[in-house]
Amino acid sequence: MNEEKKKELMQKANEVRRGIVTGVHSAKSGHPGGSLSAADILTYLYFEEMNIDPADPKAADRDRFVLSKGHIAPALYSVLANRGYFPVEDLKTLRHTGSYLQGHPDMKHIPGVDMSSGSLGQGLSAAVGMALAGKLDGKSYKVFAMCGDGEIEEGQIWEASMFAAARKLDNLTVIVDNNNLQIDGTIEEVCSPYPIADKFEAFGFHVICIDGHDFDAIENAFREAAETVGQPTAIVAKTVKGKGVSFMENQCGWHGKAPNDEEYAQAMKDLEVTE
């Protein structure tokens, strides 16, 4: 990736992060930590990788995305808004009574959301179903699902993975946002899913391990996934929870807490810089 493109993506990801923090602050609730860790990959997906059209969000041949860890809805909403699915200004209505931007993605009311999600472990099964449907219908669309590293402690994730590999769903890419923290502490302390890459490989996936904040690595991983034939791909992305906001980085306390006014001002100041 050339430096100009990389800088452009970093700036877009920075705007996505600003939208995340603004939404959660306005709501006075939400999940900033995991939203910020996923921002770079979501930015790449929606601005570079996926075949999508904000003017036609239900196009039959569009690529699909399922946010299996639905609590990081602020990240998905921010990237959708910045991509043109709805006004960026609406991010300030996050979780407000009457707003279409509720605490978890809702496919019935939010343009660009392909699957309602929130109950951890279930989103990947929906993505597998979409990928299988594409194969059965002879369609060329691709399906992407993002899971949390804490979420993959759920057994349903592995049932879905086993099925995806058995059906050779090479149109499916699973991204694991491996920020190493969940609500109660590190994932090792709670119920370790490590070694994550080895587990997906054992379940029949082609596995790619990357730095989830390096746009060159992200680009190469999705290119490799697109070229993989006969098996689904898992991209295990090492990330930093709270990435970009100094006092949130690597702090599990920011899993599900909103910044106050002073903290919001500091976060937005941190996010004035993209490098």
Image (tube, rainbow, N blue to C red):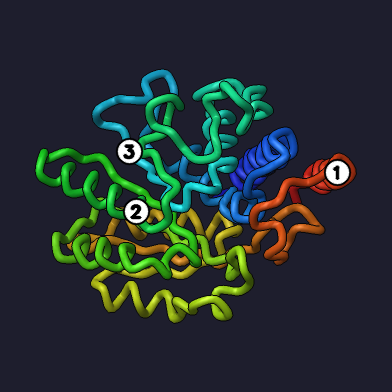
Secondary element under disc 1, as helix, strand or loop, is helix
Q: Which residue is the site of mark 1?
A: 269
State the residue at coordinates (46%, 44%): 45
**Would you place residue 95 above or below residue 156 in this image?**
above
Secondary element under disc 3, as helix, strand or loop, is loop
Mark 2, mark 1: which one is toward the viewer? 2
Q: Quadrant of residue 34?
A: bottom right
Q: Quadrant of residue 19?
A: top right
* Most foreground residue, 19 or 7: 19
The three-letter amino acid code for the residue at tag 1 is Lys
- Residue 80: give x, y in percent of width and height: 52, 32
Q: Let me know if residue 92 appears in the view.
A: yes
* Most foreground residue, 265 or 17: 265
The three-letter amino acid code for the residue at tag 3 is Asp
Asked if marks 3 and 2 touch (Cβ < 8 Å), the reply is no
* Marks 1/3: CA–CA distance: 35 Å
Q: Which residue is the site of mark 2?
A: 122
The three-letter amino acid code for the residue at tag 2 is Gln
Q: Which residue is the site of mark 3?
A: 63
Which is nearer the N-term, disc 2 or disc 1? 2
Q: Residue furthest right?
A: 262
State the residue at coordinates (25%, 52%): 128
- Label 3 crowd bin: few (<14), some (14–19), many (20+), radius 10 Å: many
